[in-house]
Image: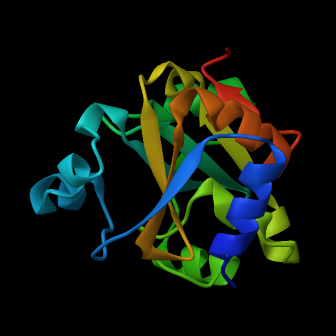
Amino acid sequence: MSVTIAEVEHLLDSLKLAYRIEHHAPITSIQEAMESGLLSDLGMTAGSMVKNLLLTDTTGECYLLVAPGIGRVDLKGMARHLGCTRLSFASLKTFGAVFGTSKGQVTMFDLLDDDERVNRVHLVVDSRVALIPGDTAFHIDSNTVSVLVRAQDVPVIARTIQPTYLTYPEA
C-alpha cells in the first residue's frame, strides 16, 4: 500500500508546482539525513526539513502531522487545539495497520492512497512549515526516493490531498 512516484508527479503537475525527484540511500530520520550528507547533496539544511509524525489519541483517531524538522511538537497544545483527547506517537503496530509500512516512511503523500484505513487519518500541517525558506522534502514510494517541493506550497498540496486538512497552530 504505497503511493507511486507517478501519482505524486501527476498531483504536482496538475497543481503546476515546481518539484524535483531525488533517489538516495535509505533515510528514516532527519538526523540520518544530516549525518549521511544527504541534506547538503540536495542543497538543503536541517532547518528546511519537515517531519511527518503519525499520532493517535486515546479513542484511536490518527493524525498525520507535518511540522518543521527542528524543534519539539507541543502534543498537549495540539490536542487542545484539535479538540481531541491526549495525543501520543503511534505504535509500530498502528503504522503497519494503517499504512502497511513502518516509522520513518510515512508522509502526507501516502494519504493519496484510496484505502479506507488511510482515509481515516486526519492531515494536520503546522502553519510554520509554509514559512520555511526554499525547498523541503518528502519520501515517496520508499525511504530511498524524495520529492522536493517549495515549503510555501505544502498547504496547497495538503488542501488537495485532504480538503479538510487542519492547521496547527492556527494559521
Q: Is residue 146 left or right of residue 59?
A: left
Q: How is the image coloured?
A: rainbow
Say which residue appears at 69% left-offset and 63% top-offset: 8
Q: Which is more toward the observer, 76 or 161?
A: 161
Residue 59: image quadrant is: bottom right
Horizontal and vertical percent position of residue 157: 72, 42
Residue 103: image quadrant is: bottom left
- Residue 144 vertical placement versus 10 (above, below): below
Horizontal and vertical percent position of residue 84: 72, 38
Say which residue appears at 63% left-offset and 36% top-offset: 154
Q: Is residue 57 visible?
A: no
Q: Which is more toward the observer, 93 or 135?
A: 135
Q: How many marks?
A: 0
Residue 25: image quadrant is: bottom left
Horizontal and vertical percent position of residue 79: 62, 34
Q: Is residue 26 visible?
A: yes
Say which residue appears at 54% left-offset and 82% top-offset: 101
Image quarter (top left, top right, bottom left or bottom right) of the N terminus: bottom right
Say which residue appears at 67% left-offset and 24% top-offset: 81
Horizontal and vertical percent position of residue 167: 69, 28
Residue, far top: 171
Q: Is residue 98 left or right of residue 165?
A: left
Q: Is residue 14 left or right of residue 106?
A: right
Image quarter (top left, top right, bottom left or bottom right) of the C terminus: top right
- Residue 116 vertical placement versus 80 (above, below): below
Q: Which is more toward the observer, 85 or 21?
A: 21
